Image (spheres, rainbow, N blue to C red):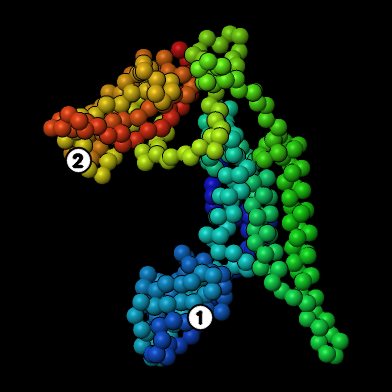
Amino acid sequence: MATLSSLAERLRSEIGDIGKSFVYQTTADGVTNRYLIPYSPVDGANLIVHVNGADVSNACVVEEETGYLTFDSLPNAGASIVVAGTYYRYFTNNEICNFITDAFNQHTKNHADPYGRGVTITNLPGVEEYPVVVYAATLSLYTLANDAAFDIDITAPDGVQIPRSERYRQLMEMTQQRKAQYIELCSQLGIGLYKIDVFQLRRIAKFSNRYIPIYLPQEVDDRSMPQRALLPMPTYGSQQFPSDVPTFDLTAYQGDSFEVTLQFPFDVTTYTWKSEIHMQFGDGIPLATFDIEFVDGDNTKLTLTLTSQQTEALPDLCFWDIQASASDDSGYEQTYMRGALFVTREATV
């Protein structure tokens, strides 16, 4: 199972940005609380700082990119300052994680796992881990090339020439090689940005101006409920309005009892709650209704449950939300959460 940290370590190995340990010692002058560590970028989260033998790591701030260390209070003159940690050649941990995140999001765009669920780093197939790292390496090389693009060639009066722009050309050549490597892996494995997807043209009803629904194909002996294909719709230039309702997806197993506890930042016992499951948002007939109970000893939590008979009849993908109404105000109703409910098919009936 891949994690963000494991992919980050592989990326550092690919671009030769392996961490190195260091120990730096200096003496406080009693004038400034800001000192330069001659190693950067540094791993600020794991930096250890001692002043006269006392650990003050939590009483100082380090600029990871530049190596400047700032103490919350002024160290006494003559105090011994010892700093130990890890430094890198090119990027901080946050920058490496950003490269991995961007590469993963682009690599898995519009792709799902065999159960129709969105791909996350934790369920990313092992064969796709290296292509994601290769693509992240391409993004990091672009960043290095952008920095090198500002270097210019130097020609001295004595005829000595320093072709500083050669670094930019080498980086761009390596970037193109890495990009070609990613394209080759994706094309041969059928994954990522160069995966060949099969789509179907959408039809629009002439009189109602509505899309004709498309359902996912099923095996001839599959008697489960047909699953509608969730296809993106063009906006035709229309402005899209974001929703202020938080999204929280649920996962259940067909034929098993289901339970989930939700926490809210207010007293939930002062409201009346209702939560339903529908095939699509806006459907009039619910597939099932959650049984909602308050949690004893904690008035900020609700427990939502389904029986095994209810999960037995649910499709592979459906949608839910939870609404609250006030007992003292008949006109108040608020939706606090919504999301998808993924149901894994059972084998034992």
Q: Residue 17 placed where, x, y %?
A: 64, 63
Determine the secondary structure under disc 2: loop
Tell me where residue 36 appears, x and y as whole percent.
51, 80
Can you name the residue that lies furthest to the right here? 159
Position of residue 287 relative to residue 336, above or below, is above
Badge number at residue 267: 2
Can residue 299 be seen in this snapshot? yes
**Hey, what amino acid is under mark 1?**
Leu
Q: Is residue 28 left or right of residue 117?
A: left
> Can you say whether 94 is above or below 267 in the image?
below
Quarter placement of the N terminus? top right
Quarter of image, res 31: bottom left
Give above or below for 97 relative to 340: below
Q: Quadrant of the C terminus?
A: top left
Q: CA distance from mark 2 to mark 1?
A: 50 Å
Q: Which of the 4 quarters of the picture holds residue 158? A: bottom right
Q: Is residue 58 left or right of residue 332?
A: right
**Which is nearer the eye, 264 or 325?**
325
Q: Is residue 199 left or right of residue 23?
A: right
Residue 6 appears in the rendering: no
Residue 36 is labelled as 1
Mark 2 or 1, nearer chain start: 1
The structure residue drawn at horizontal position 36% and vertical position 84%, both measured from the top left corner, is 74
Point 43% across, 75% down: residue: 49
Residue drawn at the location 78% of the way across and 53% of the way down: 177
Q: Is residue 63 above or below residue 257?
A: below
Give coordinates of residue 129: x percent, y percent: 63, 44
Q: Position of residue 24 (x, y in %)?
A: 52, 79
Name the amino acid, label 2.
Asp
Single out the mark in the foreground, 2 or 1. 2
